[in-house]
Image (cartoon, rainbow, N blue to C red):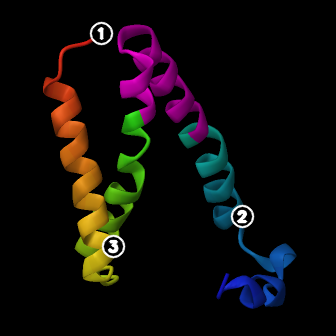
């Protein structure tokens, strides 16, 4: 939300074609890949595990941003991401019902 005013100040029509290709790529192929992976997983895993893997998305974003040098999140958010990751480890070893 902090960047919202900056979005309105961008001259979108003046952006080079590479920016538009990148936006189209991210909107199309990453969405299709995510949809394929979720459908693939939903056939092979119990529904609870498929839904639980969605909770890993913020942890991956936190890890990626930190490793790219954009800064790490506060400790209390990091603890929440670790709890979610540990819960998935427990679910991975739990018997399917």
Looking at the picture, does residue 53 appear above or below residue 1? above
Density class for disc 2 (Cα within 10 Å; few <14, some 14-19, many ≥20) is: few
Residue topped by disc 3: 77
Which picture quadrant has residue 35?
top right
Looking at the picture, does residue 43 appear above or below residue 78? above
Density class for disc 1 (Cα within 10 Å; few <14, some 14-19, many ≥20) is: few
**Taking the image as drawn, is residue 3 in sight?**
yes
Q: Is residue 40 magenta?
A: yes
Decide if residue 25 is on the left or right side of residue 64: right
Magenta stretch, residue numbers = 31-51
Residue at image point 24% right, 55% down: 83
Looking at the picture, does residue 68 appear above or below residue 82? below
Tell me which label, 1 or 3, sits earlier in the chain.
3
Q: Nearer the viewer, residue 61 or 8?
A: 61
- Per the rendering, the mark at residue 97 is 1
Look at the numbered disc 3 and give the secondary structure of its residue.
Answer: helix
Give the image location of residue 30, x and y in percent: 54, 42
Query: Which dot, 2 or 3, sits closer to the camera?
Result: 3
Give the image location of residue 70, x and y in percent: 34, 82
């Amino acid at each position: 939300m902090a960047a919202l005013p900056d979005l309105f100040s961008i001259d979108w029509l003046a952006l080079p074609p590479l920016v538009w290709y990148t936006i189209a790529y991210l909107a199309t192929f990453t969405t299709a890949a995510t949809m394929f992976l979720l459908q693939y997983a939903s056939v092979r895993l119990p529904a609870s595990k498929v839904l639980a893997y969605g909770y890993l998305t913020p942890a991956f974003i936190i890890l990626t941003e930190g490793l790219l040098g954009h800064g790490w999140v506060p400790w209390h958010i990091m603890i929440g991401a670790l709890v979610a990751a540990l819960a998935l480890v427990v679910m991975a070893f739990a018997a399917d019902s």
